[in-house]
Image (tube, rainbow, N blue to C red):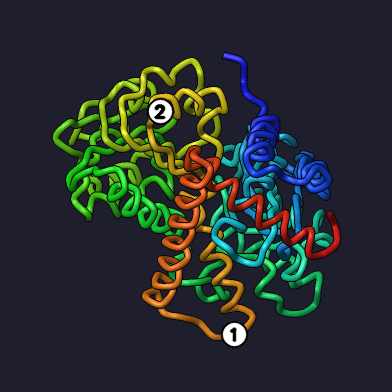
Amino acid sequence: MKKNNPFENSREQLEEIKNIIDLDDNIYEQLKTPQRLLEVSIPVKMDNGKIKVFTGYRSQYNDARGPNKGGIRFHHNVSREEVMALSAWMTWKTAVVDIPLGGGKGGVIVNTKELSESELEKLSRGYIRAIYKLIGPDVDIPAPDVYTDARIMAWMLDEYEQIAGKHIKGMITGKPLNLGGSKARGFATAQGAAYTIDLAVEKIGIKKGASVAFNGFGNAGANLAKIMFDKEYKIVVASDSRGSIVNRNGLDVDKLIKHKEETGSVVNFPGGESKEGHHCMEEEVDILVPAALEDYINKENVDKLKTKLIVELANGPITPEADKVLNEKNILVIPDILANAGGVAVSYLEQVQNAYAFYWTEEEVLVKLKELMDRAFESVWVEKEKYKTSMRMGAYALGVSRVAQAMKDRGRG
């Protein structure tokens, strides 16, 4: 199958929403491309004494609503097109949850499994040195993403503050708690998705104990599986890059998470049957959660799906062609720019806490997150009904309209 270009996918979605909401041509032309795209070379002295040069990117898509915001991913498939697409989606995402931020994204082409801890730290610090002049709490605020975490954010914060010669905790989010991180940030993406699922199942009549399949069992996927397991959903399939584990009677998620931590995969978990590939596609379930990378559901496999609700915990897991098929089948999709917005929402709350140097309890953070996610879901549903369209286009109608209005208010129209 030909690999989709994620940036072309994002543009196709923007063009579709332009026609739905009658977006101004002048605004549309500006929203088709990032305001700034930086490509950098990052030389790292490896443990063997040799220099290896890594390529990194930072895309700053649109700052009309506030400083750009978006994660940094370390992955061998990172590309210019990917970071541009992700920064576009982040622009709409921050607008959908109505926080005063724009959209950015960064990445480095690297397989972190091939690096020692020392090499990983050098790469992390080198990336910040390369983009230092273009980031900061009032400009562009990075965060964790695929194969980056609180430890890496701490190295990046330290490097930035050493260059600046002062403490600037709000320059990055997803930090360790004792360096200004927020409680609940580690599972915020999953918790935000859980709040949207609570509302969606009520809308379409999915009952308690519904069956769920997870494609991807990393941080976000495992955390959401745990939340849903505790709410008595039946998790019947979980897959990762090595294969799938299936149990129609339900997997014990607590034990599965422990197994994954110990072995590095869900495969060979004694509480289910191991199968090759992403077996989620072939199982009949009430809810499917794509929680890995882009293009998981595409025109080649969309007809295999047997589900009522899809929750896009990953960014861009459904191609535009597949999306049209799902709409025709009346399968409800909670789109990524709503479903996984919990992470950026709590990152914003982390910034607020950094600015005030006053920190909330986990319960206080979760109350604020729930308010943001519930309001965003209901607002998207209103747009969906207003334009008689999908949840995705309802979310785009809301997000793009808010960005467009901010641009007009600034005189950029």
User: Which three-letter amino acid code belongs to the residue tagged 2?
Assistant: Arg
The answer to whether residue 43 of the structure is visible from this angle is no
Q: Which residue is mark 2?
A: 242
Q: Quadrant of the C terminus?
A: bottom right
Residue 236 appears anywhere in the view: yes
Tell me the quadrant of the picture where the N terminus can be found: top right
- The percent position of residue 83, horizontal first and vertical second, equals 69, 42
Counting other residues with Cα less than 10 Å from the Cα at mark 1, is it few (<14), some (14-19), or many (20 or more)?
A: few
Residue 311 in the image, given as x and y percentages of width and height: 41, 42
Name the secondary structure under disc 2: loop
Residue at 14% across, 35% down: 249
Rendered image quadrant of residue 18: top right
**Residue type indicated by callout 1:** Ala
Q: Is residue 328 left or right of residue 255?
A: right
Q: Quadrant of residue 368?
A: bottom left
Q: Earlier in the sequence, mark 1 or mark 2?
A: 2
Q: Quadrant of residue 205?
A: top left
The mark closer to the camera, 1 or 2, is 1
- Could you tell me residue 254's position as x and y percent? 24, 50
The residue located at (54%, 55%) in the rendering is 149
> Which residue is pictured at 21% across the width and 41% down the height?
210
According to the picture, the residue beneath numbered tag 1 turns out to be 357
Q: Is residue 276 above or below residue 268?
A: above
Between the residue at mark 1 and the residue at mark 2, the CA separation in whole angstroms equals 43 Å
Q: Residues within 10 Å of mark 2 (few under 14, many from 20)?
A: few
